[in-house]
Image: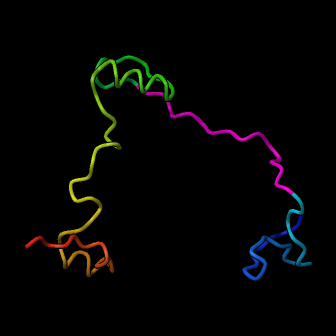
Amino acid sequence: MAVYRYDPATDRMVDKATGEPMVTGPYRPVAPMHIPDIPAYLSPVDGKYVSGRRAKADDLARTGCVDAAELPRKTDGRFRNREFAAKRGLTHLLKEESQ
């Protein structure tokens, strides 16, 4: 079985032993593409079984709820504590103080 590596000079994956490109010609998928569905769960509001994205959307609409992942973040992904950020090398993520 061939082992491939990325070659930055050609911007392609090449065989590690021979240097031959991994794929020649147009891209052809070797297997059908598949995106798995979300795992099933019991609705915390009404206790009904929710399985799949469509059922989740229906459950949220029926119960008048929103997905917590869609809520805006309080700090917008930024840090306020300068010491905390500096200790972890995250000073580029500091929230700018409004004056």
The N terminus appears in which quarter of the rendering? bottom right
Q: Residue at x 22, y 75 (%)?
A: 84
Query: What is the x, y in percent for residue 80?
Result: 18, 69
Residue 94 lies in what quarter of the image?
bottom left
Name the foreground residue: 88 vs 24: 24
Q: Is residue 98 above or below residue 43?
A: below
Name the foreground residue: 84 vs 30: 30
The C terminus appears in which quarter of the rendering? bottom left
Q: Residue at x 49, y 29 (%)?
A: 53
Residue 34 lies in what quarter of the image?
top right
Query: What is the x, y in percent for residue 19?
Result: 88, 78
Query: What is the x, y in percent for residue 71?
Result: 29, 44
The magenta stretch is 26-41
Q: Would you say residue 34 sits in the magenta stretch? A: yes
Residue 73 horizontal side relative to residue 43, left or right: left
Residue 80 horizontal side relative to residue 8, left or right: left
How many numbered tags mark residues here? 0
**Colour scheme:** rainbow
Query: What is the x, y in percent for residue 39?
Result: 50, 33
Residue 88 horizontal side relative to residue 41, left or right: left
Instruction: Specify the principal SS of the magenta part.
Output: loop
Q: Residue furthest left?
A: 99
Q: Residue at x 35, y 44 (%)?
A: 69
Q: Residue at x 76, y 78 (%)?
A: 7
Q: Is residue 34 above or below residue 16?
A: above
Q: Would you say residue 71 sits in the magenta stretch? A: no
Q: Is residue 59 above or below residue 17?
A: above
Name the foreground residue: 28 vs 68: 28
Residue 12 lies in what quarter of the image?
bottom right
